[in-house]
Amino acid sequence: MNSKTLRLLILTAALIGCGLIALGLVFYPGNSPALPATVTLTPAPTASPTPPSAPVIRRLGATVDDEAATITFYLAAQVPPRRTVREAWLWYDTTAGHTPRRFEGPLPPSVTLSYTLDARREGLTRTLTTTAELDYWWLVRDSAGDSVRAGGIAHLGPNLQALVAPPPPPQSSLDFTWSLSETRHFRFHYMPATAAERDRFQLGRVAEASLRRITAVLEMEFDGQMDVYFVPRIFWQGGAAYGDKVQLISYLDRNYTAIETWTYFTHEGTHALAQDLLQPKEEGGPDGVLVEGLAVWASGGHYRREPIDEWAAVIAASDQYIPLHDLRTGSFYEFQHETAYLESASFVKFLVARGGLDKF
């Protein structure tokens, strides 16, 4: 076979091979185009809101028309099925708005309400502030008695702000005179028809017994009278002492501090008796450690009977302990109240035990 014939055979074989490869690529399953699938389009169901199980406020707001000097408060609310809106109320922070607007039912379960405040006709006399923000709230109550409340803020423009009037001055104080009752060492001042007036004789016995206790502990005598003002509200923890041995004691039937009255007499009474010896730091006297520590120690505890040294030892071993240096040089009345008072009482007890009351 000559070379020309050989080259022809090789070329023919190469062409046949290329053709076979091309046919294989065409019919290889992995590269075959997929037939389009039949698609059935099912329309999605229209979403409907879930009925509420309690009244809800879907939308509320306030539209301010500064040029017209009006504010429109609006509300969209819904109550559960088979109920109606019994009433709705709108309140806003002006003198007129403090008399709420009532929308009387029965109204449909789904309701939209609005009210337009005309500032030029109704006025904008404020009750709390005179800022550009006007608070308001809505309340909706259904026929089952369930209610929902929500509020918002209307932002006043410059024209409306110019119409804002400040709150009226407070009314003059009532014509009031303290009632007075006396014991050997106390003058009680109290409001008529209060718990203090009702219990004044019992309070007198408690006060005198408390005074006998603390004068014995302090080794002092007292022959005068101290003024005690009983008030039917809780101030601080319920007691305070002022100059000239004047004391204030909270006395009311529902005293949420759960502090027994005798402890006010012993604690504040100690402050009163010790005024000749210990004055507050602001007046050049010793620090709060000695002033309050003496009152807690003489009372046998802080507004109750308690083991002072044992409690102080527990505090000293905890991360709540306040070093004595910090108590005496820092702002005493800004420290944790119970911790500072009990530590101070234990320190005073130590000083008295070591040197006696004369040196104290």
Image (cartoon, rainbow, N blue to C red):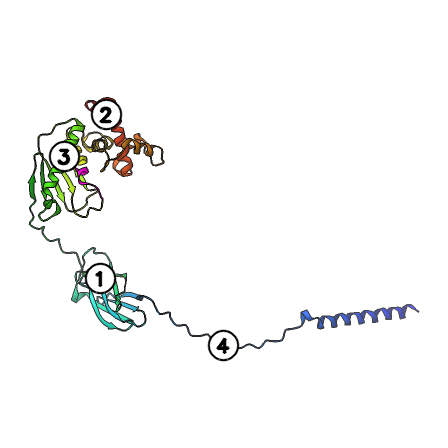
Q: Secondary structure at mark 3?
A: helix
Prevailing SS of the magenta stretch: helix
- Which sits earlier in the primary sequence, circle 3 or circle 1? 1
Tell me the number on the disc at residue 92.
1
Q: Classify mark 4: residues with Cα within 10 Å, few (<14), some (14-19) or many (20+).
A: few
Q: Earlier in the sequence, mark 2 or mark 3?
A: 3
Which quarter of the figure has residue 74? bottom left
Amino acid, disc 2:
Val
Q: Secondary structure at mark 4?
A: loop
Residue 162 appearing in the image: yes
The residue indicated by pointer 3 is 209
Residue 201: where, in percent of width, then height? Answer: 9, 41
Q: Residue 183 location, x and y as percent?
A: 7, 37
Task: Tell me the kind of residue under disc 4.
Answer: Thr
Report which residue position mark 2 lands on: 352
Q: Nearer the viewer, mark 3 or mark 1?
A: 3
What's under tag 1, amino acid-wise?
Answer: Tyr
Q: Residue 335 vs residue 279: left or right?
A: right
In magenta stretch: residue 263: yes
Q: Residue at x 36, y 33 (%)?
A: 317
Per the image, the residue denoted by label 4 is 42
Q: First in sequence: mark 4 or mark 1?
A: 4
The span from disc 3 to disc 1 (Cα, nearest Å) is: 54 Å
